[in-house]
Amino acid sequence: MIATLRGRLAVKEPTRIVLDVNGIGFEVKVPLSTSSRLPEPGNEVMVLIEMEFTKAGVEFFGFLNKKEQEVFRLITSVKGVGPRAGLNLLSRFEPDEVLKAIRNKDGDFLRSVPGIGEKKAAEILKRFDMVQREEPERAQRISEMGDQLRGDAIAALVSLGLSKKEARERLELVKLESDMSLQELLRKALSQPR
């Protein structure tokens, strides 16, 4: 299985990119949230990959961060919910918004996305409940990826000489985005006024 692709971004469209990997062009379908954060064509990028086997062949779906990929996996693990519905959901909402709606059993939120009707929304909610029961570590990991990043940032800021209190205060002033790296979060936290 292909887990990641790294190469030159040859084509960038709202929901489709082409990565040139050593002269081979891989077409990868992406949500709007991913394509909007990608650099201009010509730059090198790496995307996380989910593969789907269809009658027509193999399709690749790409994501810039693990949380988007985990939400996509959760949604598409439901029978009858295809990858396009997963991309539609992530094109309209941030992963944290999707998870919050699922935890709150907000079927209306899910039904607002083309390709997800009442029955599929109910199945997604049921699937998440099952994951929480059978794979509690995975459910916790999906829900707490943002918390983990903040925890790592606090530890790094303390190692740079800040008190835990000051590190928390600075981090509270930074809007945490789903694709934010630890380095970017630290840079923004350090740029906050004392």
Image (cartoon, rainbow, N blue to C red):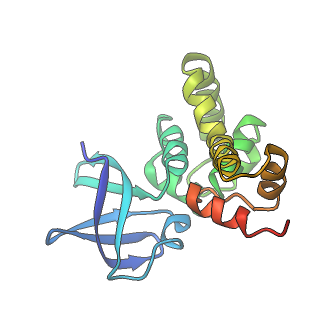
Q: Residue furthest front?
A: 161
Which residue reaches farthest left? 23
Task: Looking at the picture, tell me which residue is in the foreground, 129 or 192.
Answer: 192
Q: Position of residue 76 (x, y in %)?
A: 48, 42
Q: Is residue 9 left or right of residue 179?
A: left
On the image, the x and y values in percent for residue 17 come to 36, 71
Judged left or right of residue 154, residue 130 is left
Residue name at image x 76 percent, y 47 percent: 108
Residue 66 in the figure: left or right of residue 171: left
Q: Quadrant of residue 151?
A: top right
User: Which one is nearer the viewer's eye here, 110 or 171?
Assistant: 171
Q: Residue at x 22, y 55 (%)?
A: 56
Residue 166's place in the image compared with 125, above or below, is: below
Q: Residue at x 55, y 28 (%)?
A: 138
Identify the residue shown where x is 66% and y is 46%: 146
Looking at the image, residue 110 lies above or below residue 113: above
Figure quadrant of residue 170: bottom right
Residue 22 to residue 72: above or below: below
Q: Where is residue 12 drawn, in percent x and y?
A: 39, 78
Quadrant of the frame with the N terminus: top left
Depth check, front residue: 131 or 170: 170
- Residue 121, how many percent across, how many down? 64, 40
Q: Is residue 110 visible?
A: no
Query: Relative to residue 17, is residue 32 drawn left or right?
Result: right
Which quadrant of the rendered structure holds the C terminus? Answer: bottom right
The answer, for residue 34, to whether it is visible in the render is yes
